[in-house]
Amino acid sequence: MTSIQNNLDEVRATLPAGVKLVAVSKFHPLEKLKEAYLAGLRDFGESNVKELQTKQPQMPSDVCWHFIGHLQTNKVKYIAPYIDLIHSVDSFKLMKEINHRASINNRIIKCLLQLHMAEEEQKHGFIPDKCIEMLTDGEWRKLDNIKICGIMTMATNTSDSTIIHRDFAGAKQLFDYIKTNFFPNDSDFSIRSYGMSGDYHIAISEGSNMVRVGTRIFGEREY
């Protein structure tokens, strides 16, 4: 049994039923992804378009690729043919470009609204008020080739668990508000993607049902 399989088994044992594991494979070599695949993993998260373009053709076709990093509009065209879920939709401009590229590829691309809940200014994402404003405006309803399936966020980078709980609790409250007011009858709007290697236990306790774990599975990144 490989170390990656051991690590995966350990992480999986800590996940309640209904919580999906996405392995953050960015900056890890293809060999490690293949080990994880052989251990039964199918959901991989990447944050660099060029790196994803290199890995995707060399992995089996049943892999579900998650884009979890900041996505520039001019890079959407490269991943539109195969990406399964884009976690990091942080503007209506990006949403429109994803819709455009999905249409060209005759696809409907699933997306998450990235919310800025953390204290750091450099993190991407909709400020909650701006997200509500965008949804209320309603222009997104005209985009037939994307499917908004939930939210994504990251907690403040801190060792203070109280702050991390606060950020994730705020994300769950915002998810509930958006669900009630904009997607009340849409069962696909169900994903709460938050929690990484260092804080996914807290995230799950605050309602996350999709965690993005890298270091706990693959070890330290190889830049």
Image (cartoon, helix red, strand yellow):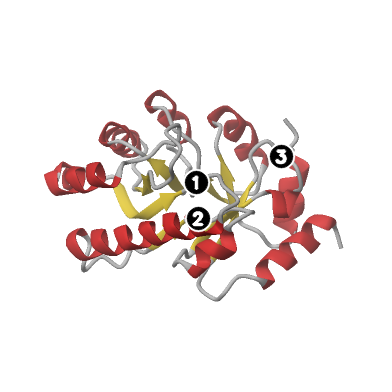
Q: Amino acid at mark 1?
A: Thr
Q: CA distance from mark 2 to mark 1?
A: 6 Å
Q: Name the image quarter holding residue 103.
A: top left
For label 2, count other residues whose C-alpha is less than 10 Å away and answer few (under 14), some (14-19) or many (20+).
many
Say the numbered circle drawn on residue 28. Answer: 3
Residue that badge 2 annotates: 164
Label 1 residue SS: loop
Using the rendered image of the protein, determine whether residue 189 is visible from the camera's viewpoint. Answer: no
Name the element at disc 3.
Answer: loop
Question: Observer-nearest residue: 158 or 177?
Answer: 158
129 displayed left or right of 150: left
Q: Amino acid at mark 2?
A: Ile
Q: Is residue 51 visible?
A: yes
Q: What's the CA distance linking mark 3 and mark 1?
A: 24 Å
Give the quarter of the figure containing the N terminus: bottom right
User: In the picture, which quadrant includes the C terminus?
Assistant: top right
Measured as percent of width and height from the top left, residue 67 is found at 50, 42
- Badge 2 or badge 1: first in the primary sequence: 1
3 and 1 marks in contact (CB < 8 Å): no
Q: Amino acid at mark 3?
A: His
Mark 3 or 1, nearer chain start: 3
Image depth: mark 3 or mark 1 in front: 1
Q: Residue 132 at what x, y percent from top left?
A: 21, 48
Between the C-alphas of marks 2 and 3, the distance is: 27 Å
Residue drawn 58% across the image and 32% down it: 53
Write down the quadrant of residue 145 in the picture: top left
SS at circle 2 = helix
**Callouts 2 and 1 close, C-beta under 8 Å:** yes
Question: What's the residue at 46%, 37% (across, down)?
Answer: 120
Residue under pointer 1: 156
